[in-house]
Image (spheres, grey):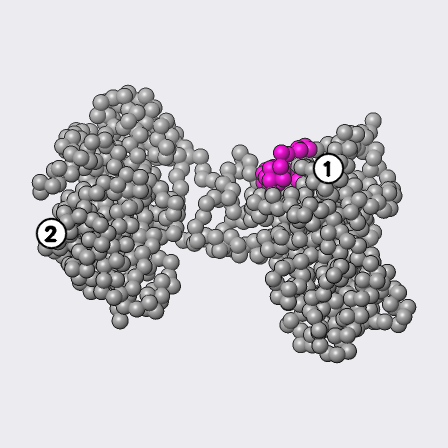
Amino acid sequence: MSTVAVEVVYRGIFQKTLARNIVRSIVFAARKEGKYGTAFGRYGDSPERNGIPAKQFAIVADDPEELEENLAVYEAQEVDVTINVDDTMCKGIESWAWYGLQPINALTKPGGTLIVTSRQEVDALIEDIHQKDQPYNISTITSIPSFSGLWVYKDDHTDVRILGALAKVCPQLVSLESMVEAIQDQGWDNLKVRSAERTYERTTMRPVEPGEGNQEEPFSFDLPGWTTMEEGIVIRGIEQGGGFRGGNEGYQPVRSSVFKKYSTRSMRPIVNFDTCIKCTLCWLQCPDTCFDVTPDGLYDANLESCCGCGVCEAVCPVADCVTMINEAEFNDNDSQYEMWQKDKDGYTQWMTSLIEKQKQVDRTHGFHHVGGYAEEIAEVAED
Amino acid sequence: MTTVEEQLFMTEKEELISGSEAVAIACALADVDVITAYPIRPYDTVMQYVSQLKANGAFDCDFIVAESEHSQFEIVKHASSVGARTFCGSSGVGWFYAFEAIAVTAGLRLPVVAMVGNRALDDPGAFGVEHNDALAVRDLGWMLYWVATAQEALDMALMAWRIAEDPRAFLPMALSCDGSFLTHSQAIVNVPTQDQVNRFLPGYDRGKLQLHPDNPITVAPQVNEDWLMEIRRQSNEAMTRTPAVIKEVYEEFKQVFGRGDPSPFIEEYMMDDDPDIVLMGMGTLALPVRVAIRRMREQGKKVGFVRLKFFRPFATEEVQEALGSSKAVAVVDRDYSFGSPSFGGVLFNEVRAALYPLEKRPHVVNFIAGLGGREVRVRDVEDMVEITQKAIDTGKIEQECNWIGVRE
């Protein structure tokens, strides 16, 4: 008697079909071994929003009764394997339904495995991932974030590569042979079978010790009770805001204490305060009011409320003044303006190096960059 | 110079008016801010009288004739959220067409007062009274009152705003008025003075929940499963607080206006000697039942009548106390609930459930009568009592639900 639960953490809409393919294939493969399973998306994520972290689950058991017992929960309380298909979510995920920030490994069982598709070194990922009290394993698949979404589906084999890795790190779930059969049953070609087998061969696990990783306390809040909640389905508005950092000059809006949005981001804007012409466009066009106005009339992106849409970069009339950079390059949400003020030369150097690196097309901008995806596929294929 | 409005309600006087006209006059006396309308018989009589009062300069309000019942209820819902005292209403399927707005009005705890001119649901198109229209909202957080006379219509309307707008409640309230019997027949009604009403009915203050630029709030956001149950629990709590509010308001009304029953929830008729058989029903049905009871009493039959006034909140304890010492209860439903327990009516099943915890339970027999505005005759009531007596005599209910006055 055993039940195995797997979750796929993915970017809403952009990776929806990918997640669906993975969880469904798991159940198909388990069926080959006479097991019973279910695949479902977390209802609270629906309707999905572009880029906002969402989850799908596959639960497999030896018999229907056992499966039923594990279905009595809405969201699994713990899983044997967590699959993260965009490494920027290693910093934690906030669904759009006001849950606070959940560490990517929150549900990963002691001794379980976290599979991440990434081009980063595993140690760099662990730096982002919140530490746990219990040991677990991490396994990486070299890949850019797959854009196998609801509207646009790029078949880049990420689904089958993950299935191959899964058979390796969690042999109690299903064998590679069953995975291959499930892949073939869905009418997928032999190239996809080969991708699964190759990933199976290459996959290794790196144990993560208790206490290892990001020490930050994830952002959380207490859900109100019926006696403390406002009546009439009323949510009180937040204050208007005031001067920059509480001063008399500039402007800084007050922001929601229960919804931050930043885990939606796969890229973030970096601002060149020296070339900014104070045209106000980024501040005006930002859909999330994320720019603080500094006393000297510059615009500082508040990185707890920036969802990484890239509108600021698009509307900025000055070359390289606002540039979207891969979120994986950063480990905090600190103010760029304050960094620049403290050490202008140091900031300029840091910023320039990031922009240069970005120009090497390290990864696409939040799935938007036209043509960039095709370029990177070719590059990854060579690896 | 006094205005027409002031002159009109300067002295207390008797008027010969229908239940609908009484409600319209109550709207003027209560100085309702926003009234919406869309014609459907029999509710439309209220809008006729409201527009007449307005045209005559006797009543100043925003009177909006909407393009449908749905909009009609949406408009008052929003007006109520910004702090306006509101009134609207409908009948039959018109009430159902507004159902989405009606449901959220209760969810948002908005004290809209509505009149339901009870009417049969289509199809077939029919104008006569059935209670199924108003009863459809019984689970949603609306207070539901069944009116029996034009005087009661006026009095309860005045109390309705006071009860609904009490911050302990902040729940909408519907006054159910039987089509034709109440909406279209005129009776002598004592119309109070504006001064009396002003002493009784304060303005509507939505307080911290008022939607206003100076009080920035979001009303009705999207929530998930980890928020919704608390919201429902709050609505339930508000409803459990309403009996106390109703009692308080009713007592004060009696003091200011000098009329009213002992209880706001039920009206008892010939119940002092704990009769063996108690009839129970709602609305204008009271009239033939009372006549029938007087006749049967003359023949020495111990029969009484309990008229349920508030269907929501349901006064469980008062109903238990009134019916608990009888041998049998005959519940008369002017509604149907196809497929319900015993295939009986809505009121029947509620009353039977309320009596279940009693140690000594009376028989509960159900009668479906007067559907579609068919008259419930004195003879019909006598038939009901006869069938109920049989249950007492044999100790067994032969048929729990009986359709009365229906052709075979």
Q: Which residues are magenta?
A: B62-86
Is A108 situated left or right of B380 in this image?
A: left
Q: What residue appears at the point 28 percent right and 46 percent down from the top-left corner?
A: A17
Numbered marks: total: 2
Determine the secondary structure under disc 2.
helix
In the image, residue B75 lies in the stretch drawn in magenta: yes
Chain for disc number 1: B
Reading the image, the residue beneath label 1 is B47
Q: Position of residue A241 (x, y in %)?
A: 42, 34
Work out how far the residue at label 1 is from the one at label 2, CA to CA, in angstroms: 77 Å
Q: Quadrant of the N terminus of chain B?
A: top right
Q: Residue at x 64, y 64 (%)?
A: B343
Q: Which mark is residue A198?
A: 2
Residue A39 on image: x %, y %: 31, 56
Badge 2 amino acid: Arg
**Residue B387 sits in quarter:** bottom right
- Among all residues in the image, which is located at the extreme right? B298
Q: Position of residue B341 (x, y in %)?
A: 62, 66
